[in-house]
Amino acid sequence: MEETLLHGLAAEVLARLVPVVLPALRLTPDELRHVPGALDAVWVERLPLPSAAAKGQTVALADHGDFTRVTSAEDLARERAARPRTQVYESVHISGDSWIGVTALHLAGMLRREVVCSIYQSSAEDSTLGPHYDTWVGVVVQMRGAKKWLIWQGDGEARAIVMRLGDVMVVPRGMRHDVRTPADPGYSTHLVFAVMDEALPTRPG
């Protein structure tokens, strides 16, 4: 992708993400921030996403605690035909010619935290990770379709949130959650910028 366009897309994403993310990083462990329509849906749907055919792109097929990793579109199609599972496009932030990588890099610089990115793609019938919690703050961006989240805040009952195209949500580290792809529209792609807890080293002055 042309460098000017690349940085332009990253700048537009950051301009919309930062006002959501910065306040959310000050939330307590039991708080959640969900912003419907934070990003324009038509614009988001036009943003390019990596594919299994991309050189060196690893895709993990997730079924609860089991991950099967493939590196080719052919292997991915074969594995999914045998057992439909959520696809996790790992470490998409390391690509030098992706708006995602540029966005993650700038976000890391602003937050002084390591930021890594994965993309989760699924259909309604796919197996999932099951209820779990993460060891990072997750900045979730719904890129395609819709995703239903069940989130446990404190000791209360699960709260249901349906993420739709353009929605952004910040999930605190350690908050238990489960996700499913609803039958309508029957598919989902969401991106997660994982903000790690450890601070980046300060540059010498």
Image: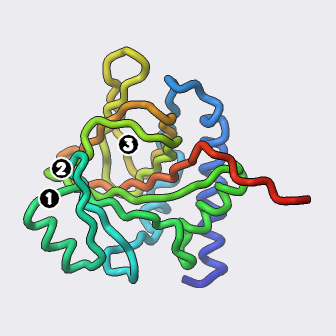
Say left or right for 2 vs 80: right
Say left or right for 201 vs 116: right
Q: Which residue is mark 2?
A: 127
Q: Residue at x 32, y 80 (%)?
A: 53
Q: Residue at x 47, y 60 (%)?
A: 44
Instruction: Return the residue nearer the eye: 90 or 14.
Output: 90
Q: Which residue is mark 1?
A: 84
**Image quadrant for the N terminus?**
bottom right
- Depth check, mark 2 against mark 3: the one in front is 2
Q: Amino acid at mark 1?
A: Pro
Outermost residue toward the top in this view:
155
Q: Residue at x 56, y 69 (%)?
A: 99
Q: Which residue is mark 3?
A: 163
Instruction: Return the residue nearer the eye: 195 or 143.
Output: 195
Q: Amino acid at mark 3?
A: Met
Q: CA distance from mark 2 to mark 1?
A: 6 Å
Q: Is residue 115 above or below residue 197?
A: below
For the residues bearing labels 2 and 1, Cβ distance under 8 angstroms: yes
Instruction: Return the residue nearer the eye: 104 or 159.
Output: 104
Residue 160 found in image quarter: top left
Q: Is residue 119 above or below residue 38?
A: below
Q: Is residue 107 above or below residue 198?
A: below
**Image quadrant for the C terminus?**
bottom right
Say left or right for 75 vs 162: left
For the residues bearing labels 1 and 3, Cβ distance under 8 angstroms: no
Q: Secondary structure at mark 3?
A: strand
